[in-house]
Image: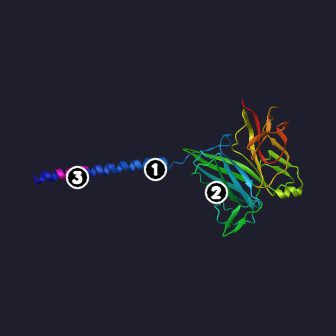
Amino acid sequence: MKLQKLLRFNRTTIILVFAIILLGVLSWLGVQKFTSQTVEPLEEVDLPFDAEGPYAILSPRRDGNALILNLKRTASYDSVIYELAYTSKVEDTKVQGTKVLEEGEGQGNGGSIDRGVQGTIDTKDKKGEYEQEILFGTCSKNVCKYDKGVENGTLTLHIKKGNKAYKMVTQWYLQKPDIALGVLTSGDNHLTYKVDASREELSNVGFSIINDLTGVPKLPAGKTALGKVYSLNVPIAKELKKGSVTLELAESPSPDVKLYRYNQSKGDWEQLDTKIEGSKLSADVSGAGIFAVFALKK
């Protein structure tokens, strides 16, 4: 009798041990499957332009040592990471405190050196617009060290929405209007703004910046954008005098195509009295803003 009880006890123990081991193996396999699914990186898709998508407007700080990044139409996105890349003079080679993408030591090319700053925009509150100041250098204990001779670069946005990831790259060009003698250009030279002002008035403006956009404010009814859209801005409380704007397309447009300027203070597009010469469109304009070429939507 005791032997039978002992055998039954051992058999029950063996079954329980086997069940526990089997449950542990199945649990481990489940964890491995879940982990492999969650850590798999998202494939990032290049998004050069989406009229209804997010976009970034850049403005220069008064002293030219920083940019103001203003992100628009971001409410539906889960995260935004920005990367600002630019070149500076070799004389300023040691930057501490900011996350530098490329240290640049020994990488100088013709008196310049590559720089990069990375940051994250907190989008938890799902706002439609975010603003961030980006320094050309770093500050520590109220002492700032700035990169010198910064003129142009790129802004890359890494944006996630659910299980989708996008990369958006724009080009920017920072200029002093008085040094440029009032002729401001985009990084690709396809947009030119000639300012009707004296050198003293241009000097008072300080800095200007032109960057191309990955999206645009709400388009006028029945219109579609042709080619790149550009934003021209000066520091807050400064004003760029009237002048003439020229925008060059890849090919000659039809006669119904027009230049438009978005007046941010009014929040509206205004059609400009456009002249077309080959692939170039030009018009007189009253100041800075967003410039685009619109055609009738087919």
Residue at the extreme right: 198
At horizontal 68% and vertical 55% (from top left) the residue drawn is 84
Give the residue at mark 1: 35
The CA span between labels 3 and 1 is: 33 Å
The CA span between labels 2 and 3 is: 59 Å
Q: Label 1 neighbourhood size at 10 Å, few (<14), some (14-19), many (20+)?
A: few
Q: Is residue 117 among the parts visible in the rendering?
A: yes
Give the residue at mark 3: 13
Tell me: 187 left or right of 3. right
Residue at the extreme front: 266
Mark 2: amino acid: Gln
Q: Position of residue 207 (x, y in %)?
A: 79, 56
Q: For numbered disc 1, what is the local secondary structure?
A: helix
Q: For numbered disc 3, what is the local secondary structure?
A: helix
Q: Is residue 221 above or below residue 110?
A: above
Q: Nearer the viewer, mark 2 or mark 3?
A: 2
Q: For numbered disc 2, what is the local secondary structure?
A: strand
Q: Is residue 11 magenta?
A: yes
At horizontal 82% and vertical 47% (from top left) the residue drawn is 287
Q: Is residue 104 above or below residue 246?
A: below
Q: Label 2 neighbourhood size at 10 Å, few (<14), some (14-19), many (20+)?
A: some
Q: Determine which of the numbered discs, if any, sits on residue 24 in the image.
A: none
Identify the mark nearer the N-term, 2 or 1: 1
* Numbered range of the magenta stretch: 8-15
Identify the mark nearer the N-term, 3 or 1: 3
Q: Determine which of the numbered discs, if any, sits on residue 118 in the image.
A: 2
Residue at the extreme top: 298
